[in-house]
Amino acid sequence: MTSFDHKTNKNDPNWNQSKEKGSPWALAFIVWFFKLLGPGLTYGLTYFIIWFYYLTDGPKRRHTADYLGRLHDYAGEKSPFAKQPGFWQGLKLYQNFGEIIVDRFVNWTQPEKEFFDIEWKGQELLRAQIQTKRGALILSGHFGNVEVLRADAQGEELPVKMLMFVENAQKYVKMLGQINPQVMDHLICLESLNIGNLSLLQEEIEQGHLIGILADRITEGAPGKTSSLPWLGKDASFPQGPFALATILEVPVYTFFVFKSGPRKYEVEVRPIFDGQPIKRKERQAAIEKMQLDFLGHWEKLCVRYPYQWFNFYDFWKS
């Protein structure tokens, strides 16, 4: 769900109020180009656009380099880079971002199985959860292509809905809506939710829906506090809200990461991190932090394996 337009940092939870950049006619042109000429040529067009963004936006280019550098130092001997990453590694991350944007168009316009080779690990966990007739929370981050969760849900008969701050991503949602009007059917607007009004989520869970949440960014209006936790060797702020929701609603939690492992090939990985059992109020904070550390630890490992798939274009550590 990420875009070049977010202006988030650890001390600025109001990133979701920032204006989206980008010309409406340019976005409309990309959608038109995709519909007319298909994904093949659109990938090529996107590479030119990505070059423009990369060369003209110095701050985001520096933030990308900061992430790649921290990842290299953190991984040590297991670093995915032979030497300190620089200009070309940053460009490769941007190119991966553009490629996955087009992949998302494909997700919503044609049967994925005919275009992508998607390998699931842990799908049986979600199916078993569905059999209980009660929903769960599915936590991911701005990593890889989480749209596979929503789009693939139609073919796999997974009752998935994504909790999203729609106001900040109006252009993105509108763009996907032009590709497939059913996009909005799988969204829950975060603007309508707060800690004192969880009835909407409660209803969705009672109906057996799996609620997807991106748990790597602080969002104003989301329930819960923040935690300062080590990530890639330095403390950063993370929202407690998604994890607190699980203890309040007493629902299971699974991590869900989708990463591109080759040309037209994706891997989907599902892991349980909370069973949804009732927790005493005084023990909730410890349970929340345990879930957070599990989530972050596994995410770090994925970033080492796939360093060009965390799409973050702001000063995450507030250097």
Image (cartoon, rainbow, N blue to C red):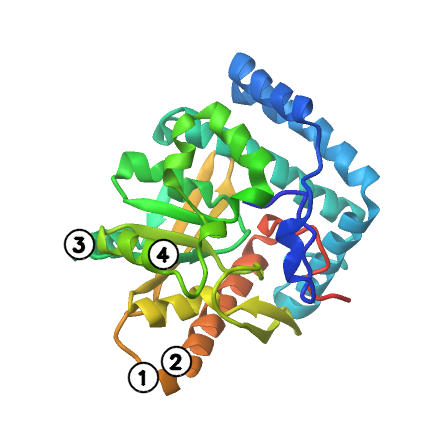
Q: Are marks 4 and 3 in contact (CB under 8 Å)?
A: no
Q: Are marks 2 and 4 in contact (CB under 8 Å)?
A: no
Query: Residue 64 location, x and y as percent?
Result: 72, 52
Q: Amino acid at mark 4?
A: Val
Query: Residue 280 location, x and y as percent?
Result: 31, 84
Q: Which mark is residue 133?
A: 3
Residue depicted at 78% across the width and 48% down the height? 61
Give the CA separation, mark 3 to mark 2. 25 Å
Q: Amino acid at mark 2?
A: Arg
Label 1 or label 3, whichever lies nearer to me, is: 1
Is residue 103 at least partly visible in the picture?
Answer: no
- Quadrant in which the C terminus is drawn: bottom right
The crowd level at tag 4 (other Cα within 10 Å; few <14, some 14-19, many 20+) is many
Comparing 69 with 194, the one in front is 194
Is residue 39 at least partly visible in the picture?
Answer: yes
Marks 2 and 4, the one that precedes in the sequence: 4
Label 4 or label 1, whichever lies nearer to me, is: 1
Residue depicted at 62% across the width and 35% down the height? 98
Residue at numbered disc 1: 280
Q: Residue furthest top?
A: 36
Dot 3 lies on which element?
loop
Marks 4 and 1, the one that precedes in the sequence: 4
Comparing 311 with 202, the one in front is 202
Residue at numbered disc 4: 270
Give the CA separation, mark 4 to mark 3. 19 Å
Dot 4 lies on which element?
strand
